[in-house]
Image: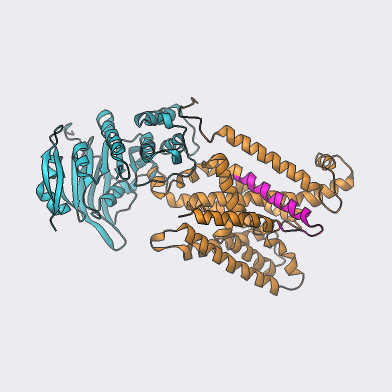
Chain colours: A cyan, B orange
Amino acid sequence: MTDPAHPPAPLSTRDLRLGYGQNVIIPDLNLSIPAGQVTSIIGPNGCGKSTLLRALARLLPPGSGQVLLDGQALHTLPGREIARRLAILPQGPVAPEGLSVEELVWFGRHPHQGRFPVRRPGDREAVEWALDQTGMRVFAGRVLDDLSGGQRQRAWIAMSLAQQTDILLLDEPTTYLDPAHQLEVLHLAQRLNREQGKTVVMVLHDLNQAARYSDHLIALRGGEIYAHGPAAGVLTHDMLRDVFGLKAHLLADPDTGCPHVIPYALTR
Amino acid sequence: MTALPGGAPRFTTARAVTVAVILAALCAALAILALGLGAVPTPARSVLAALLGGGDDLTRQLVLDLRVPRVVVALLCGAMFAASGTVMQGVIRNPLASPDLVGVGAGAGLAATVFLLAWPAAPPGGLPWAALAGAWGGFGLVLLLAQERGGRLHPVRLALVGVAVAAALGAAQQLVLVRAPDGLGSALTFLTGTVYGADSLRAARLLPWALILLPAAWALHRTLDILNLGEDLATSLGTRVNPARLLALGVGVALAGAAVTGAGILGFVGLLAPHLARLLVGARHARALPVSMLLGAALVLAADTLGRTLLPPLEVPAGLLTTLVGAPYFLYLLRKTP
């Protein structure tokens, strides 16, 4: 029997070692992503945040160890089956010229279609649902090149949503967006988690956004987990000093009570 | 299918069908024009009559036996180069990729030349296989030389290496031709980018390759769409990227290799046609591939027909005219590429 308050981790790693060639980025990582929560991975540049997220989505094969999806080793599962359970939006995706939003979102149905794709009613429903969730229905016929950065990012997220997976991974989804568009993306991630029960994992640079929009934080330093858990326990003076080399004021967010970080000096 | 709001889509299936019908009509009109050209001009009415099985015996023989093969070879080679370029640009995600710019055409040309000279008595069906081997050889050489650390391919670097390798392989081909015994060498001029002298034998050699590979390329349209999103996204959508790439490149290289045995390298057709097709009907390969094939076919037939009418009785090779149009466009793309 599984404890309903603590369902098993949908995504976890066992003795995971990651790197590029001789360059080891993450030496040995054991990690569990909590089910039905928003998790954000934070850490300085080069700590292995994106490397880890890419490995969780089988975009980077492990040097050794395993990534487990619902307890099954990721590399033993067929690509299409993974794509029906886990979607990842990599950093800075580039669409072919002249592609419309609706055409892009339809690609999200690829893992659900057979060798000879027949568009079933369920596919169309999923595409329209994804367009509605991201507020992109009004742009469905528009070509991606003509959209703003925020709209384009929502179109990409809509494609990932059309995959109808329980797990959604977003690699720096707010980079290059203005503050309003950043909030739009974060609200969307939060809503998908609250309303659909999706497990969301993001790599975020902004500590305050991570604190406010995540249930669970993972602070990485040098390829190792320095701290993890709810924001209140992770965003501490010690962590900011050891992981980021920052001195900061920690205030309570007036809405959530979460820590709010105001850095004022470097420790090195 | 319910129409979604947000403005009419720029590229629709209806639009693609319209474009394809117009291009097919253009090809047909060019074909009738080309079939009437020759030492004894034939009016279009007689050409049509001969095609439909009427007319006098002399006209029928002239049109069907002597002129149809040349038109068929021009159309097929154009379509195959165009399809090859479309596939390669989709897989390599490089606007500058095209069979003649990644060593495929030059490799096929050199191999075909050597094959014909070394083995004059070989069965005619063997030539495309030799060209195919050469095409992979040229392509492999370019990939090897253009690859940076980590296996990345920079678009401009690929094009530069491709041009250099193509020039070297082309020179080797010329050398082999010059050293060939009298008569044999001139029999191989068709490998240098012209439809001149295409006979029914050459058309028959080309036809099975075209009939298999052109539909095969179209059948890959969804794979190409997904690969065109890049390695990460293709993987995340459940595609096994490397086998898919290999399959698509295999079809693309084979298309160009076979086309070379029809008319040699028809410069820049494989670069020009896919770009024009995407401008006309968008990036989705289900639409872009057929339109690109039709564009390539029309382009080569138009170039050949023009080449025959410019300076009679001299014939300007079709490949020369396509290069004259394609080279400036290539330079424009080079400037546009970051």
For the question of whether residue B98 can be seen, the reply is: no
Position of B306 compared to A7: left or right?
A: right
Residue B259 horizontal side relative to residue B48, left or right:
left
Is residue B270 positioned above or below B49 on the image? below
User: Which residue in the rendered view is the most extreme toward the front?
Assistant: A264
The image quadrant where one finds the C terminus of chain B is bottom left
Instruction: Compare residues B157 and B226 and report the one nearer the observer.
Output: B157
Instruction: Decide: is B155 above or below B53.
Output: below
Left or right: B283 with respect to A61?
A: right
Residue B312 appears left or right of A113: right
Looking at the picture, tell me which residue is in the foreground, B47 or B262: B47
Is residue B24 shown in magenta? no
- Total numbered circles: 0
Measured as percent of width and height from the top left, residue B290 is found at 60, 42
Residue plotted at (10% across, 50% down): A238
Q: Residue at x 68, y 62 (%)?
A: B191
**Magenta region includes residue B306:** yes
Q: Position of residue A133 (x, y in %)?
A: 34, 30
Residue A118 image point, x, y percent? 49, 32
For this rendering, which residue is in front, A60 or B329?
B329
Range of residues picked out in magenta? B292-317
